[in-house]
Amino acid sequence: MDGNTALEPPPLFDRLRGALLEDLMSAGDVTSQALVHEQKSAQADFLAKSGGVLCGVKLLPLIFQMAEQLVSTEAAGRAWDLDDAQAAAAAGKLSWDDALRLREKAERQGISVQLLRKDGDRLAKGDVCATVSGNARAILAGERTALNLLSHLSGIATYTARCVAKIAHTKAKVLDTRKTMPLWRDLQKYAVKCGGGENHRKGLYDEILIKDNHLALWGVRDPAGAVRAARARFSDLRIEVEVTDLEGLKQVVLNSQPDYILLDNFPVEALKEAVHWCEKHFQNSQNPHMRPTLEASGGITSETLAAVAETGVDRISLGALTHTISPMDFSLEMRFDEKVFGKKFQRNA
């Protein structure tokens, strides 16, 4: 492997299959094997038990086709249904032509998922976002993986949307960070986008972010010099540098040309002063277009978010978007025959 080749997470297909196998292992769903006939068919609805922004629904066809492959002997050799899962196809290194061919085979699949809403839609409590029908064992095998991802990703999208709404009266944008669950960063960042936020760098490989530890290991406490050194080494990458006070900002601006400056743990008044100084400096500059993007980060909460945005910063990065959110509540409600089971088994709308 080329030393400059970026390491990527396993394809999404592999991760979703691994998530299903975490539940099934080699023995499979022993409860369903004991109580549910192998040929039994069923229908179920994905029900929102709280309001919020939907994210992850496009993964459901893929999850249940995989689950059917794992538990149903009749499904052996069938193609996965990739309709409305083209993002997953891209992550899985599947060509678009192959994805389109597989879509044409969807009608021959034994399990079917009907998407009633799309990622990014706002749901009210009681809304049904998708239905699944087919082999009952396959539905039960995929239930928890589907609900876990749907709840978690929708929770991220919902919290992001709330943050975006709080600063809609300002020019600032809400961004995520690398504070994500290992191996699931791509989906978590996708959820941020569904909620109206924007993505920071994908990882350590696609953008330079110079922080205190880098300067300490470099051996010179010179942020501007570090920017110049990084630019000389990677001229094609965007460069961001962290500063912790106004003097650090001035040193960087006057002696280098970063793309972004991270104003780390600046109090609100200090942010205002930094934005004012930067705007005044570049108004008088011979090249005002070289003004770096100013990003606030560190210790920002939903309560202080609006005040930070009102200082005039261009963007605000929040680790909380992905690491301290509450999941949105969903359930998978089976449709039962009232004549057999009685009303108590009916779904509560």
Image (tube, helix red, strand yellow):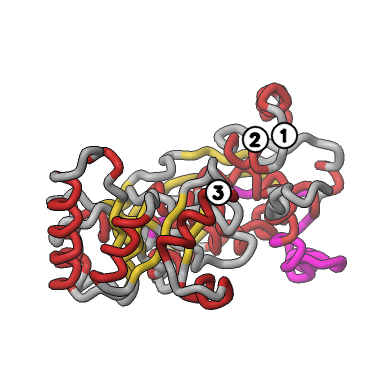
Percent position (x, y) of residue 129? 43, 47
Instruction: Say which label, 2 or 3, has the lower sequence index.
Output: 2
Magenta highlight range = 19-48
Horizontal side of 297 relative to 323 (left or right) equals: left
At label 2, the amino acid type is Leu
Label drawn at residue 83: none
Q: Residue at x 77, y 35 (%)?
A: 79
| Residue at disc 1, secondary structure | loop
Q: Is residue 324 visible?
A: yes
Type of amino acid under label 1: Leu
Q: Position of residue 124 (x, y in %)?
A: 29, 54
* Inter-mark Cα distance, 2 to 3: 44 Å
**If you read the primary sequence from the N terminus, does the residue marked by circle 2 or circle 1 appear first?**
2
Q: Are marks 2 and 1 in contact (CB under 8 Å)?
A: yes
Q: Is residue 339 visible?
A: no
Numbered-mark total: 3
Where is residue 183 shown, x and y percent of the image? 64, 61
Specify the quadrant of the image occupied by residue 301: bottom left
Relative side of 12 to 273, left or right: right
Q: Residue at x 52, y 66 (%)?
A: 180
Label 3: how many Cα within 10 Å (few below 14, some 14–19, many 20+): few
Verify whether residue 26 appears in magenta.
yes
Q: SS of the residue at dot 3? A: helix
Which amino acid, mark 3?
Ala
Q: Which mark is residue 232?
A: 3
Which quadrant: the C terminus? bottom left
Q: What residue is disc 2 on?
A: 82
Q: Which residue is mark 1?
A: 94
